Amino acid sequence: MPTTKYLLLFLVLTVAATGCNEEEFLEERPLSFFNPDNSFENFDQFESSLYDLYARVRTTHYSEDDFSYAHHYGTDMMKDARLSNSVGRIGDYTSAFNPTSGLVNWHWERWYKIVSSVNFILNQLEASDLTADQVTLIQAESRLFRGLAYRYLVYLYGDVPLYLDAISSPRTDFTRAPRADVLAQIIDDLSFARDNLPGITEVPDGRLHALVAQQLLAETYITTGQNDLAIAAATAVIDDPATALMTERFGITAGVDSFDVYYDLFRKGSQNRSGGNTEAIWVAQIETDIPGGLLTSTGGISGNRFERFHAPAVFTLNDPDGNSGMLSWVGDLNGGGRGVSFMQPTDWFENDLWASDFDNDIRNANHNYRRTIMYNDPSSAFFGQSAIEFPGTVIQSSDWRFYPWLTKVTTPMNHPPALYADPSIFLLTANAGATYTDQYYMRLAETYLLRAEAHLAAGNAQAAADDINVVRGRAQATPVEAGDVTLDYILDERARELSLEEQRRITLHRTGKLVERVRLYNDHNGDEIQDYNALWPIPLREIEANTTGNLPQNDGY
């Protein structure tokens, strides 16, 4: 022990005598884990940070949470089928949209996390070893994500904090930038992306490219009243030699004569350019049982819950004798899959919207907008007969058990094999309920309708009608006359064409039509929506945490 003690003392005195650079000695150099200093050293690492942004956008739109689908519920098109007080399903506007609402916080937080991540990525570029071309490419892709995030924030909340620098320590001094300044920054970010991203044919499925920026620019220019620029941006997408509306049958259902090209657009494998789809502009990549793919066939419904939320719970239907009329969950066009009847069409979207072309518009065909239901339980005396044709049945007393539903939300007769309890009759397990296809963020039909909106705002109703009629022509619907084109007509056409694809609430906020159209067309929320719901409230926790800044609440809240 004494020998050891003196040896230690010698070592200490030796170190003290020779001295050291304490700052260098104490500097941490992580070798076995990543931190901000060693995570952005090469192009592949920056690419990985971009992949995280793709994942964030995808889960914001298609997570397992009700909140992902709030831009569909409580609009002119969809309502809470169970008439509940659910915040996520916009059971009532007061509960859903108040400063302490989890829904309001959820969207604010997710889009600002994307802004923060982009700012951090851009900041790290300064010290990287990337080439000039690589830096520009990372900047372009990142800034498109930032423009997209601020697009959602400005339309939902109005004036919002606008910051473009990385934040490395807590801040309490945020202020609300004027809406015009936020829109100007969106245009600046999108313009940089447009000028520096590759073309649509140069990227793999799901990757951002210049035409995505052009389409978002067209929409933003409409908002800022720059209609000529909006027309030019939309035209760049429409006239690109690699884009065209799909007018011929394609994909796995191309040989089924009873279907049509609109049905083909939403079948598995048909959403991407690699599947022959020239109409796709930007598509969320969703895979099953692949790491990072979002969905699983064995562990419950982990995302993209459109089938579960929108398809009706037909398995609950009894026949007129009071016996079971339906098998549990049948994944065909009659059974609708694993639906639970949460997201029901409004009466307007179910009936009035289609009145003039009810029988010829293919988007309203029974295989696209399912309006029939046949008893499918062989033990029922009514097997094979229509459940709608018996007055006084459970459908009439509880209409949420069956309502017309959009077949684009499911994969009829093509669910993942592991989800079939009995594949011979397409009987599903309880783990079904997702929509097992990629999802459109943007497709060319919307581009035509955006350009029509810009033409109308510029005073050229004939050009607007011409663009609308390209979309209606593919749908075999009656052409619209120039004198009948209004902003409301364009919103109607968007509802027919882009149902459950566009984030409907964002469109209505953007055009200033949310309150008006919910009052007119939503038979559940129409009596309760208030004028101040034209914007969402600023989350109270953000206001309270911002002790040295200025985040005033939106009027009415």
Image: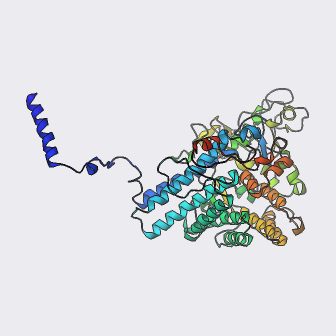
Left or right: 541, with 497 as reference point? left
Query: Which one is nearer the viewer's eye here, 398 or 317?
Result: 398
Does residue 337 appear in this view? Answer: no
- Work out whether 458 lies above or below 168: below
Residue reaching furthest top? 322
Snapshot quadrant of residue 100: top right
| Residue located 34% across and 48% down the image | 30
| Residue located 84% across and 31% down the image | 394
Query: Which one is nearer the viewer's eye here, 361 or 13?
Result: 13
Snapshot quadrant of residue 359: bottom right
- Work out whether 371 lies above or below 86: below
The x, y position of residue 272, in whole percent, is 62, 59
Snapshot quadrant of residue 44: bottom left
Task: Please identify the quadrant where the C terminus is shown.
Answer: top right
Residue reaching furthest left? 3
| Residue located 70% across and 58% down the image | 254
The x, y position of residue 138, in whole percent, is 50, 63
Task: Please identify the quadrant where the N terminus is shown.
Answer: top left
Query: Which one is nearer the viewer's eye here, 133 or 329?
Result: 133
| Residue located 54% across and 60% down the image | 142
The x, y position of residue 49, in whole percent, is 48, 54
- Work out whether 423 lies above or below 133: above
Count of marks, rendered view: 0
Residue reaching furthest front? 548
- Judging from the image, the colouring scheme is rainbow
Does residue 471 appear in this view? Answer: yes
The x, y position of residue 478, in whole percent, is 87, 63
